[in-house]
Amino acid sequence: MTTNALDAAETPRLLLDAARMQANCVRMRDHVRALGPRFRPHVKTAKSLDVTRAMLGAPTGPITVSTLREADTFAAHGFTDITYAVGITPNKLAHVRTLVAHGIDLTLILDSVEAARAVRDAVAGDARAPQVLIEIDTDDHRAGVRPDDPALLAIAAVLADGPARLQGVLTHAGGSYDCRGDDALRAMSEQERAGAVHAAQRLRAAGHAAPVVSVGSTPTALFARDLGGVTEVRAGVYVFFDLVMAGLGVCAADDIALSVETTVVGHRAEKGWTLVDAGWMALSRDRGTAGQPVDQGYGLVCDARGRPLDGFIVMAANQEHGTIAHRSGDPTRRLDLPVGAVLRILPNHACATAAQFDRYHVLDAQGAVAAQWPRFGGW
């Protein structure tokens, strides 16, 4: 195998296959549109104006963020309908008020009476106030109140007479990442839908407004067959996909649009190792496939054109070094590559890997770098 660094650039660098990304975006948008709800993409994976516009298929639109830094950045570029989908805390409410005062329709989520009181008191007297969704736990995975929890109505009561208007409920079925097989993913999608709809019905029966029923994760969104009662769907990692999603059967490895380009820096032939210049600072420490039937180590190894090399993974990672070996552990099955040869690594978790870089090197249909799209980080 000869060196093929596309345009002989320094590595490691983050590559984005534009055609795969566009296909992933169309797949999600068409699926959600066919089921009826509106789509509110989660931009935490992308943290990029260019990628977000591809997700929406439009210059602006409703988005979901996971940091107020994301809200600031997108607001500065004309995005005005933003859901901040991390439980709000008092130390962020001054920032929230600034965004709202500048005309942003910002929606917060919370799951406790204490948080509801903090929001109510912070915005008392403000001319403009954020909207609020109560986070619902539909899968016993992370945050939220259970659909039948009495706390649901207690939280709603705190917000009833304040300027921060209760708009409904939001849930995220992160438990879908533990599902195995299509039937399990469809069942989790229905569990997510039914729990959120039930919580909204309880609010309405008690006299509270609940026009919004927001659900979403990439697996449940794509495996949903009925979204009756749901008004919007959120998802994010679908834009790139990754090895965790492939391991769940949500996508194929050929759908993964993101990879890290890396260069061979040395060998330990007696161990069957090939050393490259992408360690965990480039790939991240995410080992999301470790609990799946196929453990992909720190990433699946591909040739310079992005074609998987059968059986080879990044089996260990130091800060700036990755160690490639055959998953069998057989040292005689090693890559016969010269120093300077270029490879690509498919990521376990696209969000974590992308976070290591400040830009995407965007590949055209011929595999050449056609553009560089900036991305941002921070909180």
Image (cartoon, rainbow, N blue to C red):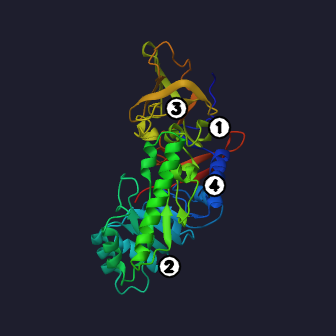
Amino acid type of disc 1?
Asp
How far separated are the C-alphas under marks 4 and 1? 37 Å
Mark nearer the N terminus (2 vs 4): 4
Which residue is under mark 2?
Answer: 103
The answer, for residue 341, to whether it is visible in the render is no
Q: Is residue 272 above or below residue 312?
A: above
Label 1: which secondary element: loop
Could you say which disc has been placed on residue 7 in the image? 1
Amino acid type of disc 4?
His
Label 3: which secondary element: strand
Outermost residue toward the left in this view: 114
Which residue is under mark 4?
Answer: 31
Q: What residue is at 48 percent from the left and 78 percent from the top?
A: 102
Mark nearer the N terminus (4 vs 3): 4
> Residue 311's x, y, as percent?
53, 23
How far separated are the C-alphas under marks 4 and 3? 28 Å
Q: Nearer the viewer, residue 169 or 184?
A: 184
Q: Is residue 245 above or below residue 76?
A: above
Question: How many residues crowd around disc 4 within 10 Å: few (fewer than 14), some, or many (20 or more)?
Answer: some
Amino acid type of disc 2?
Gly
Disc 1 and disc 2 in contact, CB within 8 angstroms? no
Foreground: disc 1 or disc 2: 2
Foreground: disc 4 or disc 3: 4
In the image: residue 205, left or right of residue 305: left
In the image: residue 33, left or right of residue 210: right
Label 2: which secondary element: loop
How far separated are the C-alphas under marks 1 and 2? 44 Å
How far separated are the C-alphas under marks 3 and 2? 45 Å
Foreground: disc 4 or disc 1: 4
Which residue is under mark 3?
Answer: 300
